[in-house]
Image: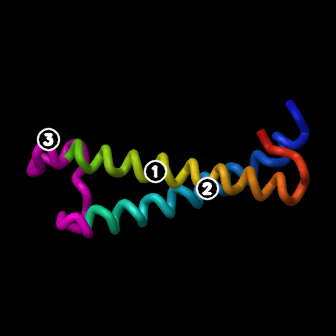
Amino acid sequence: MKASKIVYKPVGMTLGAVSGLISGALFKRAWTTLGHEHDAPGATDEDRSWAEVLTAAALQGAIFAFVKAAVDRGGATATRRLTGVWPG
């Protein structure tokens, strides 16, 4: 394994945690803005419809994937600017 990959590992893990926090906050805001209750339904919420549960899951997944990709790409770009080496 390349040394740059090993050194970047803790940075990548930290960025992953940060992206999870950001995406969670964005999802809550988006779900509330769309006119739904503050809390999104879970898969086992008996009082929620299939459509609502699956819509919430799809929206949450899309937001998470978008934020994770943006944060990971930004971290890799910043690492290259600082070190001259792409961390992947």
Q: Furthest-top residue in view?
A: 1
Q: Is residue 36 above or below residue 45?
A: below
Relative height, residue 36 to residue 63 (above, below): below
- Which residues fall within the magenta stretch? 33-52
Q: Position of residue 5 (x, y in %)?
A: 82, 40
Label for residue 71? 2
Element at label 3: helix
Number of numbered tags placed on the structure image: 3
Category of crowding for the residue at label 3, using alpha-carbon neighbours closer than 10 angstroms: few (below 14), some (14–19), many (at least 20): few
**Direction from residue 6 to residue 71 in the image, left or right:** left
| Residue appearing at x 55%, y 50% in the figure | 68
Q: Amino acid at mark 2?
A: Val
Residue of label 3: 50
Q: Position of residue 79 (x, y in %)?
A: 81, 54
Say which amino acid is labelled 1. Answer: Phe
Q: Is residue 64 magenta?
A: no
Image coordinates for residue 65, horizontal then vertical, percent: 48, 46
- Classify residue 31 by image quadrant: bottom left
Q: In the rendered image, which residue does mark 1 sit on?
A: 64
**70 left or right of 63?**
right
